[in-house]
Image (cartoon, rainbow, N blue to C red):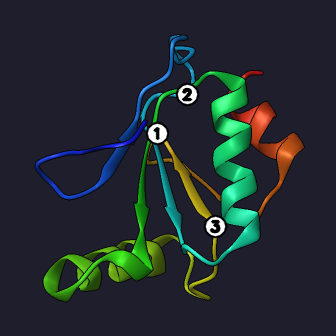
Amino acid sequence: MPILSREGEYRRMAMVEIPAKSGHIMLYTLSTCHMCQKTKELLDNLGVEYDYKCVDHLHGDEREEAVQEVKAWNPRYTFPTLIIDNQKCIVGYRENEIKEALGK
């Protein structure tokens, strides 16, 4: 179950540790995006811990900050946008690419 953190982002807690290779995982989504939901389900099924921001549910400065974060990695501003360890960006639902990047 997601819980609200101090920064206003939702954190999903998993029962399995993230492989050391994967580091921090951040997922930017839209509430109406089917591929975003599939990406969350994939991460849950892989048993990784990740943070996510549902950008269309944010307001004011928090939303603007999230928009700028997504555009910095994905100038086309499309969803889902997945950032792994502040080094790799995967745009869209790309199951095999996500699994490979996470060592799964």
Identify the residue at horizontal 73%, vertical 22% (top origin).
103
* Precedes in sequence: disc 2 or disc 3: 2
Q: Is residue 91 visible?
A: no
Q: Amino acid at mark 1?
A: Asp
Q: Which residue is mark 3?
A: 80
Residue 21 point in image, percent of width and height: 57, 21
Badge 2: residue crowd in 10 Å (few <14, some 14–19, many ≥20): some
**Residue type for callout 2:** Ser
Q: CA distance from mark 2 to mark 3?
A: 18 Å
Mark 1 touches mark 2? (CB < 8 Å)? yes
Image coordinates of residue 77 in percent, x first then y, are 56, 85
24 and 34: which is toward the camera = 34
Query: Which residue is at a point 77% across and 21% down the rendered structure image?
Result: 104
Task: State the mark number for residue 75.
Answer: none
Determine which residue is flagged by label 1: 85
Which residue sits furthest front? 1
**Residue at 62% across, 88% down:** 76
Label whose residue precedes the other's in the sequence (1 or 2): 2
Q: Residues within 10 Å of mark 1 (few under 14, many from 20)?
A: few
CA separation in Å, label 1 and label 2: 6 Å
Instruction: Place residue 1 in its image quadrant.
Output: top left
- What's under tag 3, amino acid-wise? Pro
Q: Which residue is mark 2?
A: 22
